[in-house]
Amino acid sequence: MKGVGNFYGGGFDAFAALDEQERRSSQESQDFSQEESSSGFDSPPLTRKRVTRSSENSAPGTPKGSPRKPATPGSTPKKVKVLEVHLGQWDREADLTAKESEILEKGMQAVEELADTPKRKKRSTVAHRVVESAMRKLFDGDVPDPAAPVYHTKATERLEESSGWVVDVLARSSRIHRQAEHPVDEEFPVVINLNHLTAPANNGAGFHFCPPTHHLRGEIAHVRHNVKTGVWSGFYNGKFSSFFPDCIKSEEQLVQVILNSHFQAQAESRQLRFVAVEGSPGFFIETYVHQEIKRTSAFPIFCAEHWCEDSVYEILPEYRISSQEVLADLRDPRCNKCYESQQHVIFDIAQVLPTAHLIPSGIYFIVPRAAL
């Protein structure tokens, strides 16, 4: 049985309260810098008497000379800058030394401690910059367009070849961005394992994209279609798969569909997402997320319905089920509870239905808790 995850509705509201004390501190630092500039650089050279007085009034142990200018508020910490420099120098296939690991750890900690306010989204901004440095290292230079399939095929291959520190930097930076209350608008990279989706693996896993021109299309048995969404299913070499609709004809379109899908729910490493399609009700997909940035799998849900009282649902042209029959099936131990929230629970009832030999998984019902 899959782990039960949280189901989210229409999004969230970010709490954007500016820290007054931080604002005042920033203003005072700016005022100090202006006073120092006007009284230091534009005045005549100091006389011996003024130097002596400055020395006499200094606290014990204070070095002579002009006071050091404080760091500009909001500037990038030195530890982060050092990390960015080293990201461009380290060998992505080699493990880090103890000293290099220390540089990495201190740099990432410095990113986590940066400001996170509506006017100073520094934490998310710098995390995004660190990711860009790591991606340039991953691709040994120029990074392809994330909308292009080559970006995902090459990134998947390079991540498998790279040392663990590369994935660690990408995952931690992505997590910092995701957990920030005030993230920047830029999207963080997502690496889709396209080969898993477009070709069956030796163990039978994967294979969820098979357009009409695919050379294996004719070898898929027991094909069934969801006439509302275009999602279809079948068996290849005895293994059941659901497939993306035939309106998605290329890998470029497939990448766009996954990247532009809308997050709905999370259960451990699984995410339920919604794909909006013009001229149709859209459909749900489920993706498996590994180390924050990898989408190791993505496949469409054959059927997903919002439960309503006194309704009848067409699962297949030859099989329909009423809302009351759905509630009765939810009590069957073969029913799988997938996601839940305070208001709803999502069940997969495929194994309970008489169509289980044709569609053994992927018949979801989103049920209000009040109906249970």
Image (tube, grey):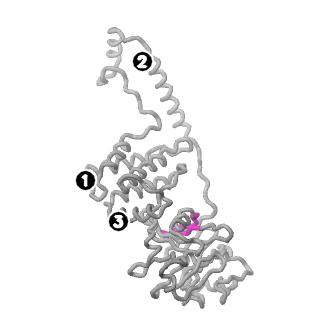
Give the extent of the magenta segment.
261-274
Q: Residue at x 71, y 83 (%)?
A: 312
Check disc 3 and report the residue beneath it. 160
Seen from the viewer's position, the closer of residues 272 and 202 is 202
Reply above or below: 171 against 313.
above
- Assess whether mark 2 and mark 3 are in contact (beta carbons under 8 angstroms): no
Which dot, 3 or 1, sits closer to the camera? 3
Q: CA distance from mark 3 to mark 1?
A: 20 Å
Q: Residue at x 43, y 13 (%)?
A: 43
- Mark 3 is on which residue type? Glu
- Asked if residue 23 lies in the magenta stretch, the reply is no
- Mark 2 is on which residue type? Phe
Image coords of residue 23 (percent x, y): 54, 35
- Mark 1 is on which residue type? Thr
Query: In the image, 123: left or right of 326?
Result: left
Q: Residue at x 35, y 57 (%)?
A: 166
Check disc 2 and report the residue beneath it. 41
Query: Mark 3 or 2 closer to N-term?
Result: 2
Seen from the viewer's position, the closer of residues 32 and 288 is 288
Check disc 2: other Cα within 10 Å, few if <14, some if 14-19, many if 20+: few
